Amino acid sequence: TEGGEAAVTETFSAETWAFLDRVAAANSKVTFDAIRSIYDDHVAAPSVGFVERMATLLPVQVHSGLKGEARVGRSMFRINRDTRFSKDKTPYKTHLDFLFWIGDGPPREQPACIVRLTTTEVLLGAGQIGLRGPSLEQYRQRLHDPLEGAEIQTIVSTAKARGSALSEPDRGKPPRPYGADHPSAELLRRDGFHLTTRHPHPTSVTTARFPAWCATRLAPYGDLLDWLVRS
């Protein structure tokens, strides 16, 4: 373009993945500052468009309660990493995360759909993690209930049969008083969980059709979200 300036795009592009690859190769503030305009035009701008489109599709195709908001702290995440408690001190993420949630509380604590974009893959999933206090206790009681426990076990096993992966457990065995032979032992080892699928970039990833591609593949998680919001 004139003046050598990159054209602003409303969809992800080859420049999006090139930016992430360049940050991964030399993850420093110097690198980021040098390509900040590429971040603004080819990462931040299309991310806003993606969230806005997903916010219209997900309530129709996945769960009526899902919502999105194109702001950091809502559906979007900072590109900066929190390195305070990490051995890895590299300052920037090399992927893009998005969250679409149900409920009026803090989005990160609610039942939600998640999307992660790497330079080669799309991760799609749903769930609720990091439960604490009364919310965690209620989750465990529901898992212990014969009917509710059996329902979520069926939902999880069906999703795994379709290719979904269950997030890692928080502990090696269920907390007391639940035994290792409990029917819901697998989920009791987790303080909430996500189920996710991994996909190579579809041909639509750099087009306006990409949000619809994502929504279609998130639709099977509607039953999981239904179970979670009844808590």
Image (cartoon, grey):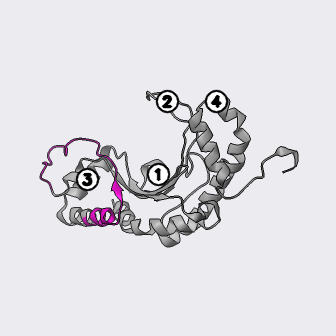
Kindly report the distance in space between the C-alpha atoms of the residues bearing marks 3 and 4. 40 Å
Residue at image location 43% in from the left, 49% down from the top: 109
Kindly report the distance in space between the C-alpha atoms of the residues bearing marks 1 and 4. 34 Å
> Which numbered disc flags the more N-terminal residue, 3 or 4?
4
Inspect the image, locate mark 3, and give the three-letter code of the amino acid beneath it.
Answer: Leu
52 vs 189, left or right, is right
Q: Which residue is mark 2?
A: 83
> Which numbered disc flags the more N-terminal residue, 3 or 2?
2
Neighbor class of circle 4 (other Cα within 10 Å; few <14, some 14-19, many 20+) is some
Where is residue 67 drawn, in percent x and y?
53, 61
Kindly report the distance in space between the C-alpha atoms of the residues bearing marks 3 and 1. 23 Å
Inspect the image, locate mark 2, and give the three-letter code of the amino acid beneath it.
Answer: Thr
> Which numbered disc flags the more N-terminal residue, 3 or 1?
1
Where is residue 188 drawn, in percent x and y?
23, 50
Location of the C terminus (image quadrant): bottom left
Please name which of the two marks, 3 or 4, marks the residue nearer to the observer. 4
> Which numbered disc flags the more N-terminal residue, 1 or 2?
2
Please name which of the two marks, 2 or 4, marks the residue nearer to the observer. 4
Judged from the image, the secondary structure of the residue bearing numbered disc 2 is: loop
